[in-house]
Image (tube, rainbow, N blue to C red):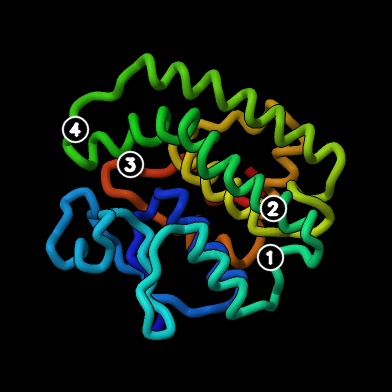
């Protein structure tokens, strides 16, 4: 049995969940309060972070290498292009969302609104929330520009880049922090990826004290 230690709204965990589901791999989800740094969890990952994946008798950490391990060991359906240029573009966009988008948007919105309360770290910082709300507009516009030229974010086929972006945006959508009317291309892209079978478990997530908005699990918004 594949086991994933995760936090439901973590975009890094969501990315791994999407890849596992797209590859049709059954996984046992174990919700982990990683911020409590239990001895057992710290043994699994001394960095004290999720996701942690137990697979093939191995314990894997860090979402990017986890996803590429899954891609290499379960190559179909493929989530990476055949060409070096194509793989570069996928990796570039994965880093865009997991680094730039995460630092400018996710950490300012999701972490301030939700994680602080879950971890008992006080009240949200309104300045950070304003910064995140401003920054997401730029990122949505950039995605719209990419989708003007491509069927999917990195090219003509669904790739890991799409799942990286959708992981962050779906977590933010859970707290109604995405303006889907800002860009028609992005809205259409998200509706398309949201309707995939791999997305079903994410749409069923429920975080105590933070109920999702009505549109969250609605495939037609």
For image coordinates 46% across by 33% down, the residue present is: 103
Q: Is residue 176 above or below residue 16?
A: above
Q: Nearer the viewer, mark 4 or mark 3?
A: 4
The mark that comes first in sequence, 3 or 2, is: 2
The mark that comes first in sequence, 1 or 3, is: 1
Between 215 and 138, which is closer to the camera in this rendering?
138
Label 3, secondary structure: give it. loop
- Mark 4 → mark 2, Cα distance in angstroms: 35 Å
* Number of the label disc, if any, that sits on residue 177: none
> Label 2: few (<14), some or many (≥20) within 10 Å?
many
Which residue appears farthest toward the right when viewing the image?
149
Label 4, secondary structure: give it. loop
For image coordinates 16% across by 51% down, the residue present is: 36
- Mark 3 → mark 2, Cα distance in angstroms: 32 Å
Quadrant, the C terminus:
top right
- From the image, tell me which residue sits under label 1: 79
Between 202 and 42, which is closer to the camera in this rendering?
42
The mark that comes first in sequence, 1 or 2, is: 1
- Mark 4 → mark 3, Cα distance in angstroms: 16 Å
The mark that comes first in sequence, 4 or 3, is: 4
Q: Are the residues flagged by discs 1 and 2 in contact, CB closer than 8 Å? A: yes
Label 1, secondary structure: give it. loop
Between 89 and 157, which is closer to the camera in this rendering?
89
- Is residue 62 shown left or right of residue 221? left
- From the image, tell me which residue sits under label 4: 121
Q: Nearer the viewer, mark 1 or mark 4?
A: 1
- From the image, tell me which residue sits under label 3: 210
Q: Are the residues flagged by discs 4 and 2 in contact, CB closer than 8 Å? A: no
């Amino acid at each position: 049995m594949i086991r994933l230690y995760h936090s439901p709204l973590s975009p890094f965990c969501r990315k791994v969940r999407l890849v596992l589901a797209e590859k049709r791999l059954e996984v046992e989800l174990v919700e982990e309060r990683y911020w409590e740094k239990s001895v057992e969890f710290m043994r699994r990952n001394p960095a004290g972070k999720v996701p942690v994946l137990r697979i093939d008798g191995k314990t894997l950490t860090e979402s990017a290498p986890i996803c590429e391990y899954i891609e290499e060991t379960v190559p179909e359906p493929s989530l990476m292009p055949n060409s070096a240029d194509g793989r570069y573009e996928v990796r570039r966009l994965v880093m865009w969302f997991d680094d730039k988008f995460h630092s400018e948007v996710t950490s300012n919105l999701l972490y301030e609104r939700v994680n602080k309360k879950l971890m008992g770290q006080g009240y949200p910082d309104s300045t950070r929330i304003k910064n995140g709300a401003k920054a997401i507009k730029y990122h949505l516009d950039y995605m719209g520009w990419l989708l003007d030229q491509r069927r999917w974010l990195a090219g003509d086929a669904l790739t890991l880049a799409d799942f990286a972006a959708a992981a962050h945006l779906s977590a933010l959508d859970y707290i109604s922090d995405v303006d889907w009317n800002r860009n028609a291309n992005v809205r259409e892209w998200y509706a398309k990826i949201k309707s995939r079978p791999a997305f079903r478990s994410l749409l069923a997530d429920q975080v105590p004290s933070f109920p999702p908005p009505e549109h969250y699990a609605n495939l037609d918004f």
